[in-house]
Image (cartoon, helix red, strand yellow):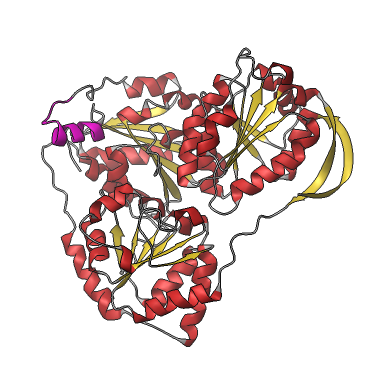
Amino acid sequence: MLIGSKEKTMKGSKVLFETLKSLGVDTVFGYPGGIVLDVYDEFYNQSDIKHVLVRHEQSAVHAAEGYYRATGKCGVVLVTSGPGATNTITGIANAYLDGSPILVLSGQVLKNLLGKDSFQEANICDMTRTCTKATYQITSASDIQSILSEAMSIAMSGKKGPVVVDIVKDVFSESAKSINDFTLAEIQGPRVLESSIGAVFDRICNATKPVIVCGGGVIQSKAEDKLLEFANKTSIPVVDTMMGLGAYSQDNQNYLGMIGIFGDKSANQLLIDSDLIISLGARFNDRITCMFKEVNLSKKFIQIDINPNEISRNIVASDYIIGDIKEVLNRLNSRLITTPIKFDNWSNEACLLKQMNIKRTKTSNMLHSFEVIQKIDEYTKNKNVLFTSEVGQHQLWAVQNLTLNNKRRIFVSGGSGTMGFGFPAAIGASIGRPETSIVCIAGDGSFQMGIHELATCVENNLDVKIMILNNGYLGMVRQLQQKMCNGRYSETKISNPDFLMLAKSYDIEACRVTSIDEIDLALNKAFEAKGPFLIDFVIEPVEVL
């Protein structure tokens, strides 16, 4: 619903542009094409909205997601029809699974050519219907403002996610009335019943060994402070999922680690030993549930999630609350004022489980991934940094060895595991937070999925530090082949460019590291550089997690 004034008549392309401004959009990631020429003409004549020219449309969506995660503002993407639109699908699917609000604006062929297999026609709405919160096709300029405002409201409400708005070419040249000033109507979330709060609170009071599972929903809800308050008041041990990393500071004494197949033994054991699991915005997908096949978690599973579709989806919940996690925690904290509860003895017992965690050791004289990540962690402890990661072994080394908190986050591809996510996401994060150094941890395989975005990085002189863990393999797949295929390594040893020469060709400073003694000097060079910097860490080829 639009609420506004000051109507004016203008071209559809101008209406679109003015609508984006009114919605608070200050950055668009995109790639031009013939269908969207009128919109790009508007960019030429203004300076209110920054356009970031990527080198591939998939990267535009990943960059928009990195921008959202760094700023909290909806990421916006603009692409042309046909392959321009279809190239965004992987990024859209990634954003959908990880709950990131992205508004993808795609150009479409002329209205009278729809459905005729016209040049560069693709039915992007049908293609993305299963990995978006909503799809729209605009065929009249008079619908631009209402549809864009509704699309952004949907993207930013409830469990956030991507929305596609497909716009036929005619719309950009049509005239339409535009309301210059309007407010975005909010979509109300589910009402949290006091009886539900009471039932969950009673379960907590009657427990003896409760545990909090912090999922990505805590971050989406901006509920970090409320979680800290709740955990401090109750002394309940806290674990997290990969998407929840950093929401609860890992320096806190009663933090037990990350759960799941590549998580900490202490965290997984804690769920087994507990008598109550309080799940906050965690999906409990197969990467987690595979660790508990012999354990019935259902009877002790309390699920709190804003998305009703997640309730009992993977584990049947014995109690649940559908609602915003920040609101739920706030109301639980209020009850603790009159009915304080404390689990100090259980918390002390739980902390002893940390002794179970694996201590990594070297298997050769070569540099090892965990050494690199630990040195990066130590070096950046007092710096203003955010991390992104590509997908593979290096991602898991990163989440296992970095020390994260509310201000020191890592942006990963969680649900989709998309190679090629981390570097464009770093670009988007840097665009959104130019005062912050962005450290992108990449594998040599994953990095080549988005290597073309070095041009985008240079063009915008972004403070992105690229840390490549170079083992000459698709390491995660190679590790699986070692375990499941008796070491038959089929198509996982890869060739790489000389990353230093490659960086030089883009006029990016770079260096190579082959021993632990060289790491600090390399990091000094990277962070003293004004703009992007690449470090090629040559590591043990067959290191395993």
- Residue depicted at x 71% and y 45%: 23
Residue 6, x across and y down, in percent: 89, 44
Can residue 332 be seen at all in this image of the molecule? no
Q: Is residue 330 magenta?
A: no
Q: Nearer the viewer, residue 469 or 202?
A: 202
Q: Classify residue 105 by image quadrant.
A: top right
- From what the image shows, is residue 135 above or below residue 506? below
Q: Residue at x 84, y 32 (%)?
A: 176
Q: Give me the residue at 57% from left, 22% from top.
A: 84
Q: Which residues are magenta?
A: 475-489
Q: Nearer the viewer, residue 53 or 316?
A: 316
> Residue 513 lies in what quarter of the image?
top left
View extreme (bottom): residue: 338
Relative side of 373 to 55, left or right = left
> Residue 480 appears at what percent x and percent y?
20, 35
The C terminus sits in image quarter:
top left
The one nearer the camera, 461 or 207, is 207
Residue 224 x %, y %: 47, 63
Can residue 321 be seen here? The reply is yes
Q: Is residue 486 above or below residue 179?
A: above
The answer to whether 79 is drawn above or below residue 201 in the figure is above
How many numbered tags mark residues here?
Answer: 0
Query: Outermost residue, top direction?
Result: 119
Q: Magenta span: helix, strand or loop, mainly?
A: helix
Q: Looking at the image, which residue is at 24% across and 70% down? A: 350
